[in-house]
Amino acid sequence: MDFEQARKDFDAWRASYPADLYSADPALRLLNRLGLASDTARLDALERDATAFGREIVSVVGPAAQRYEHRDHLPELQRYDADGRAVEAVHFDPSYHDAGRAIWASGIVAHSGTPGRAFEQATLLYLLSTEGEAGHTCPATCTIGLARALRRRGSDAVRDRFLPPLLERDYDAVERGSQFLTEVQGGSDVGANASVAEPLGDGRYRITGEKWFCSVADADQFLLTARAIGGVAGTKGLGCFVMPREVDGHPNGFRIRRLKDKLGTRGLASGEIDLDGAIAWPIGPVEEGFKTAVSIVLNTSRWATALGSTGIMRRAYLEASAYARARTAFGNPISHFP
């Protein structure tokens, strides 16, 4: 085989990737049709939205991710503005926001505002994960977890303040969520977390401490755990709180020490964050904070991680099976060999 034919075969492999990921996945379509057989209107809406999103992933999200995951276009930390004021901002390549607009417009997070939308969210998360984490699957999952915690456990005042902006489909108007749980001494041993929460007497708390691995460091709302002053040791003393990024237009008592230099999902901004009197509101009773964090927030992440894993496996299958048909060795496509 000459090199021109080899290049044609390579290009044919690239061109064989489906333009519509939902229509090209008969197993996924069958699952949705079985699960929603009694609600044809809902099924029709899901399939319409999933088809549109499957196309957007291929035409918009994938090409954008190739750029902003490249080492020359990674997130950058800006500690101060041009006048020396603290801003603690994270700046992204514009392509990152191009992908974000397509992803949030799909309703992947907005569905969290309506109980019982598991089929819709699962389908969209699975499809998105064919691009791996892509810098946005983690923010979407963190936002979904925070929204569910607020919806199920937040007081009326806390829910009304923080939930609606999380459910926007407009990426340029939405507030994205994050989950800051890990501390240096308390990774899997969450009960060892040392951040403290001081009650202010009006329902608010001041949070002081250090969070060691904070993905979505650019988020607008932070979900975090801290031990209320006087709280018992271990996980039983931890409260679960929501903390806005800004108060009165200024960083809310936090400082991004640095962004992590990671393998893998480099387009996603992960950092180390210090808290010094940050204002936060409890999500549910403070003494039940660990229960809220695990039963709602972390269980949501586990569900999304399982979906993401299947999406990544689907992408691996699509790539490998197509390559096996296009790549020849010893005079035959390698799909012919055991």
Image (tube, rainbow, N blue to C red):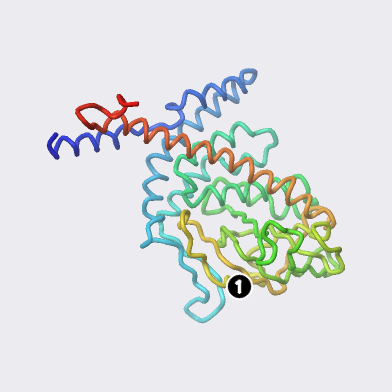
The C terminus lies in quadrant: top left
In the rendered structure, the answer to whether residue 203 lies left or right of residue 249 reads: right
Question: Residue 158, position in %: x, y?
Answer: 76, 55
Question: Residue 2, position in %: x, y?
Answer: 12, 37
SS of the residue at dot 1?
A: strand
**Which residue in the structure is indicated by mark 1?**
255
How busy is the neighbourhood of tag 1: few (under 14 within 10 Å), some, or many (20 plus)? some
Can you say whether 209 is above or below 315 in the image?
below
Can you say whether 303 is above or below 276 in the image?
above
Residue projecting furthest to the left: 2
User: Looking at the image, which is closer to me, 143 or 138?
Assistant: 138
Residue projecting furthest to the top: 38
In the rendered structure, the answer to whether residue 15 lies left or right of residue 264 reads: left
User: Looking at the image, which is closer to me, 236 or 128?
Assistant: 236
Place residue 246 in its image quadrant: bottom right
User: Looking at the image, which is closer to me, 159 or 71?
Assistant: 71
Question: Residue 45, position in %: x, y?
Answer: 55, 28
The N terminus lies in quadrant: top left
In the rendered structure, the answer to whether residue 4 lies left or right of residue 28 reads: left
Q: Amino acid at mark 1?
A: Arg
Residue drawn at 62 percent across, 71 percent down:
251
Place residue 43 in its image quadrant: top right
User: Looking at the image, which is closer to me, 250 or 235?
Assistant: 235
Question: Residue 296, position in %: x, y?
Answer: 72, 46
In the rendered structure, the answer to whether residue 162 lies left or right of residue 127 reads: right
Number of numbered markers: 1
Residue drawn at 49 percent across, 41 percent down:
128
Residue drawn at 82 percent across, 70 percent down:
200
